[in-house]
Image (tube, grey):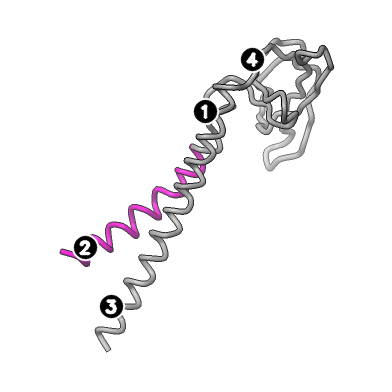
Amino acid sequence: MAKSKSTMWIVFYSFLFIIGGGLTYAAFSEFQKTKNLLQSGVKTTATVIQYSISQGKNGSMYKPVFEFKDRSLQTITFESGIASKPPAYEIGEKVAIIYNPRKRDSVKTISFWGLYRGSVILFMIAAPFLIIGGSYLLYQLY
């Protein structure tokens, strides 16, 4: 009985550790995409032209909508993935961005959260799984 209960916990904590490993891999992949974008992307300046307003728990949230011209002078508009209250940018403000000329939907603002939010959030979720699962498994080894 005690042996099967111990095995059950090892399986459970192994599962937690595997989830943490998968999330860490996803965070690393997201980081690599950003790294590649920084190496091969085109840096330019975009202008905030308006806000996309959505309702959050605490009232209205504002997502800036940017507009810029690519190398062929085609005007491109994109909406930030980050909403905030108050708005992070003023309408008319110039913001440094980077984009992949082959993938029009791959545009990021050049800021810490603009570039790395996906990696950071995924790793923040992965860390407790890795720590809890890995600690228990190491404890069982020794």
Magenta stretch, residue numbers: 120-142
**Real-space Cα separation, disc 3 to disc 4, in angstroms:** 55 Å
Q: Secondary structure beneath disc 1?
A: helix
Labels 1 & 3 near each other (Cβ < 8 A): no
Q: Amino acid at mark 2?
A: Tyr
Q: Which amino acid, by three-letter code, is at mark 4?
A: Lys
Q: Earlier in the sequence, mark 3 or mark 2?
A: 3
User: What is the C-alpha distance between the residues marked 1 and 3?
Assistant: 43 Å
Residue under circle 1? 35
Q: Which residue is mark 4?
A: 43
Q: Is residue 34 visible to us here?
A: yes
Q: Tell me which numbered mark, 3 or 4, is placed earlier along the sequence.
A: 3
Which label sits in the foreground, 1 or 2? 1
Circle 3 or circle 4, nearest the eye: 4
Q: Marks 3 and 2: CB-CB under 8 Å?
A: no
Q: Nearer the viewer, residue 124 or 96?
A: 96
Q: Give the percent coordinates (x, y) of residue 42.
A: 65, 17
Q: Which mark is residue 139?
A: 2
> Quadrant location of the N terminus?
bottom left
- Look at the picture and state if 28 lies above or below 113: below
Give residue 9's mark: none
Figure quadrant of residue 64: top right
Binning the other alpha carbons within 10 Å of mark 3 as few (below 14), some (14 to 19) or many (20 upward) gives few
- Between 131 and 104, the one lying in front of the other is 104
Residue holding disc 3: 6
